[in-house]
Image (cartoon, rainbow, N blue to C red):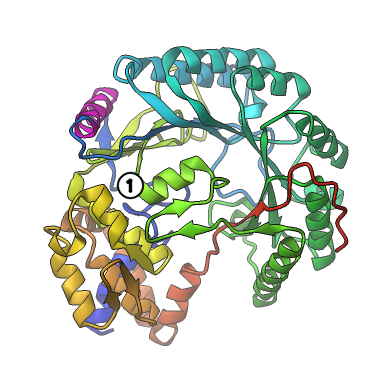
Amino acid sequence: MNMKRSQFLSAFISAHYRDRHYPPLDGPSRPFNYFANSSLEDARSYWKKTLSLIQKGLAPPDIMLYIHWPFCSSLCSFCRFGMEMPKRAQEMKWALEALKKEMFAFQDLFRDISFASLYVGGGTPTLMTEPMLEDFMSSVRRAFNIKSGAQIHFDASPATLTEEKLETLLRYGLNRVTLGIQTFDGNLLESVNRKGQTRDKVRNLFSLFSQIPNLFTDVDLMVGLEGQTAKIFYGDLIEVLRLRPHCLHIYPFDEDPRTQFKKEGKSLNDRNKLMVNELIDSARRVVVKAGYSTAYEDWVNLTVNELETRQEALWRNSRASILGIGYGALSHAFGSAWYYHPKPEFKGVTNADIPRLYAFESDIEEEARGYAVEYLSRDSKMSRVAFRKIFQTDIREFEGLSGAIAELEADGLISVSDNAILWIGRDLVEKSLGLKKLCSQKLLKAISDSEREKIDAFNVEAENNASDWKKIIENKQSHMDCFIYYDRLSQKSEKVLCL
């Protein structure tokens, strides 16, 4: 194997989830094991530094609050988020107490800060009982200030969201809910172990939603589930469109190693993958005809449609800070650190202690590198205008990045104009190698040191299968992101779908 390929594979194995994240993550919200042991006091010091940067005008002013609930009522075979089912009722009580302890541990630091948004995800936060939700939300409101008019967003399941729980959340300002439906087909729900969900429960919830002013509704659908036919998927899609959510997420099934599907030794064949691609393409035409479209984004100035989720927009566009609370939560203290709590061990939650913590310390340069890597990887373009707004200097003048940008331009991989940088290289390997030039040596060394055995094993595998090495790489990068569509019709429209 030549040096270029070897270098690529060594760097690639540690970032196979997506080069789109900086630092690279091992699955959603799960960093690699190069994050070092840290502590609650360390986390407080990270935030003190970030808050100081904000006060000096050197960091984005917005801070988002993310709280993670680690439990679900059943473990769906397609889920790659590493959720857990509580093995005993006490686990949920301990998890809630741990959330409250962690929130109040940061209360004094954020006393004068109003969070730009609150997102409670999981897992299934609505698995909490109504009294637990009351306790949880009252604790959030006591511990933190949420900006007036901020987005307060909850993940929910048709199996666990009740009218009483919805009323509790509304009292505390809920104005956006994501309902994970995935499919309406009863046989398919049973085969993927998604328990407690019925068609009637979904319809009843949407009947409730329609009576609540200013409640923004999202629906999740999945395509490519084991046993799902094109007829089943189209039926699910049409039924969701008739419910008229404000936002529709279509997730292609990803046969991630963490899914029960993959743990059982199953895999999607080429025909399945082709069907998923075809259904995604045809679904786009159907939802556009029904009055939905993707969010418009002026990517040079980073002006996003008002319907875009504020958590995502603030993170993508300004790398705003995120205070993450609870098992599985990832935090981003701008210019200071990324840190996370791992999910519960296989034995479950055993006490009410704040979960252990792992961190990768950062600085302004790492933030700038991450911004460039994520935009050029995800969108193949990066706004110089936006970069200057965030980092107060042009990327060509930013120490540590200017040389790499000049080198990529000389190699013919990027095109640089006054307002933007475009990735014009077409080779997958060249792009992955090129993006590594934007990463810091600190990050690459940390990954390499922690993943040495995996890297060596992967290089041996690729050496023994040299003719297939590029195919292996392409397959590892084949995961498709969620496709998001927003309702463009009047919310009060009585238009009947004729699809």
Residue in front for this viewpoint, 264 or 390:
390
In percent of width and height, residue 493 lies at 80, 46
Quadrant containing the C terminus in the rendered view: bottom right
Is 53 one of the magenta-colored residues?
yes
Disc 1 designates what residue? Answer: 33
Q: Is residue 285 left or right of residue 422?
A: right
Q: Residue at x 34, y 74 (%)?
A: 423
Name the secondary structure under disc 1.
loop
* Up/down of 360 relative to 284, above or below: above
Q: Quadrant of the N terminus?
A: bottom left
Residue 85: image location, x then y, percent: 62, 32
Q: Nearer the viewer, residue 434 or 118?
A: 118
Question: x, y (%) of residue 352?
Answer: 46, 16
The answer to whether residue 456 is seen in the rendering is no
**Residue visible at 75% across and 18% down?**
164
Q: Main secondary structure of the magenta part?
A: helix
Q: Is residue 292 magenta?
A: no
Q: Up-down: is 336 above or below 424?
A: above
In the shown orientation, is residue 499 left or right of residue 474? right
Q: Residue 200 falls in which quadrant of the image?
A: top right
How many other residues sit within 10 Å of disc 1, few (<14), some (14-19) or many (≥20)? some
Whether residue 297 is visible here, answered yes or no, is yes
Q: Position of residue 228 (x, y in %)?
A: 78, 61
Front-lying residue, 275 or 262: 275
Quadrant in the rendering for residue 93:
top right
What range of the chain is rendered magenta? 39-54
- The residue lying at 41 percent from left, 19 percent from top is 103
Q: Amino acid at mark 1?
A: Asn
Q: Is residue 299 above or below residue 279?
A: above
